[in-house]
Amino acid sequence: MSPKVISIRKGSAYPRGVEKGNENASGVINADFDLESASLANFDALFIPDGDETFVEQLDSERGLHWIRETARQYKTSTFVFPFCACVTC
């Protein structure tokens, strides 16, 4: 079974430095769910990669912070890529 991916929006997620729309670029992943259409109860862990400023701003929304807090409350595994951690205020 392959991992399911949640993002701030469904569809393709592009790594920093990759032009949006370039589906064949290295590191592009497809998000199966967005924060509004998924439940944390259905997932075992949370991984938050580094992202550009727009990604950080959107994840710093109330819904994004809710996911981060609930992961900790439910003792689920969380992994953050360092540059992102300095931007989130829980």
Image (spheres, rainbow, N blue to C red):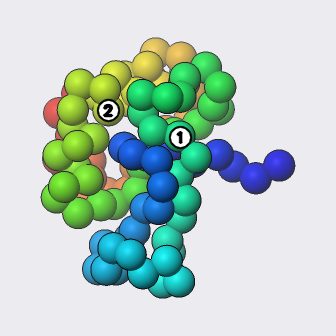
User: Dot 1 lies on which element?
Assistant: strand
Using the image, tell me which numbered label, if any, was put on residue 49.
Answer: none
Mark 1 closeness class: few <14, some 14–19, many ≥20 residues within 10 Å: some
Mark nearer the viewer, 1 or 2:
1
Q: Which residue is mark 2?
A: 64
In this picture, residue 68 sits left or right of residue 58? right
Picture coordinates of residue 88, whole percent (x, y): 21, 40
Q: 69 above or below 83?
A: above
Using the image, tell me which numbered label, if any, was put on residue 33.
Answer: 1
Relative depth, front residue between 42 and 46: 42
Question: Which quadrant of the rendered structure holds the C terminus?
Answer: top left
Which amino acid, by three-letter code, is at mark 1?
Phe
Q: 73 above or below 3?
A: above
Picture coordinates of residue 31, whole percent (x, y): 53, 52
Picture coordinates of residue 28, whole percent (x, y): 49, 71
In this picture, residue 45 sits left or right of residue 35? right
Q: 77 above or below 17?
A: above
What residue is drawn where x is 23% and y is 25%?
Answer: 62
User: Dot 2 lies on which element?
Assistant: helix
Mark 2 closeness class: few <14, some 14–19, many ≥20 residues within 10 Å: some
What residue is drawn where x is 43% and y is 19%?
Answer: 70
What residue is drawn where x is 55% and y is 23%?
Answer: 39
Relative depth, front residue between 88 and 18: 18
Q: CA distance from mark 1 to mark 2?
A: 13 Å
Q: 59 above or below 19?
A: above
Q: Is residue 79 visible?
A: no
Picture coordinates of residue 37, whole percent (x, y): 49, 29
Which amino acid, by three-letter code, is at mark 2?
Gly
Dot placed on the residue nearer the N-terminal end, 1 or 2? 1
